[in-house]
Amino acid sequence: MELQVEDTIQWLEKSNEKIQQNKDYLTALDQAIGDSDHGINMSRGFQEVVNQVKSKQYDTVSDVLKDTAMTLMSKVGGASGPLFGTAFLRFSMRVKGIDPISQDAFTKGMEDALAGIIQRGKAATGEKTMVDVWSPVVDYFKGTTIVQADEVAQTAKKAMEQTKEITATKGRASYFKEKSIGHIDPGAASSFYIFEALSEVIKGEG
């Protein structure tokens, strides 16, 4: 796989489309174990991201990702803005000076993004957070020489669905303790849409 500026913008556009289409679903997930605002916050933030990246000319993928990060941090409320923003910022820093982005560079960017989420959220796998989707996807990229678009989406979807079985120990959801079992984590769901969008961009390359 190889990611250029146009591919990266398409990834963000597709992510936004999926989040807009599923805004009410994300809100419903958050009503069960959170503040009820995840869908609203993510839809507003990603719409602002698309507005931003469509209004400018970019020379590098790193610059697109940096603008994405700054927009998410400023426009998405709650914990999601800093967490998703940190992910894209760390990603952009890792791939700075590399263009287009090779699979190896993309994998390293994803590793740094995950590390940023873990550091910012003080979270680990198995705590019913977005980490539980990002970590398996990173492992997939690290473990393959040829990325299969469908496998990216399948890995993210399986990981998202598995958050149902986890007891939340982080954030607002942790207040619900065992009652959080049976519910998909909202951040894991929005992360799935981002990786499902990525898989469609990768598929479009072939």
Image (tube, helix red, strand yellow):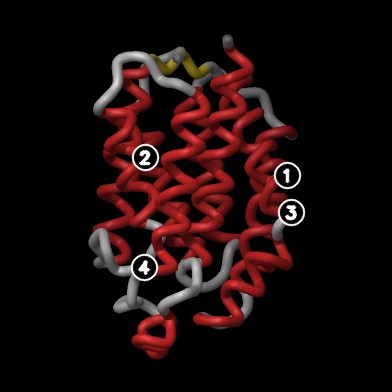
Question: In the rendered structure, which amino acid carries the disc numbered 1?
Answer: Glu
**Residue bearing mark 3:** 20
Helix, strand or loop at label 2? It is: helix
**Residue bearing mark 4:** 128
**Of the image marks 2 and 4, the number of the one nearer the N terminus:** 4
Name the front one of labels 1 and 2: 2
**Residue bearing mark 1:** 17
Q: CA distance from mark 3 to mark 2?
A: 23 Å
Q: Position of residue 101 (x, y in %)?
A: 42, 17
* As drawn, 192 above or below 44: above
Question: In the rendered structure, which amino acid carries the disc numbered 3?
Answer: Gln
Packing grade of label 2 (10 A; few <14, some 14-19, many >=20) is: many
Helix, strand or loop at label 4? It is: loop
**Of the image marks 3 and 2, the number of the one nearer the N terminus:** 3
Name the front one of labels 4 and 3: 4
Query: In front: 76, or 147?
Result: 147
Question: In the rendered structure, which amino acid carries the disc numbered 4?
Answer: Lys
**Of the image marks 1 and 2, the number of the one nearer the N terminus:** 1
For image coordinates 39% across by 90% down, the residue present is: 175
Q: Are marks 3 and 1 in contact (CB under 8 Å)?
A: yes
Q: Position of residue 173 (x, y in %)?
A: 42, 81
For image coordinates 54% across by 30% down, the residue present is: 199
Using residue 68 as the reference point, say whether residue 125 is left or right of it. left
Quadrant of residue 106 in the image?
Answer: top left
Helix, strand or loop at label 3? It is: helix
Question: In the rendered structure, which amino acid carries the disc numbered 2?
Answer: Val
The tag on residue 108 is: none
Q: Are marks 3 and 2 in contact (CB under 8 Å)?
A: no
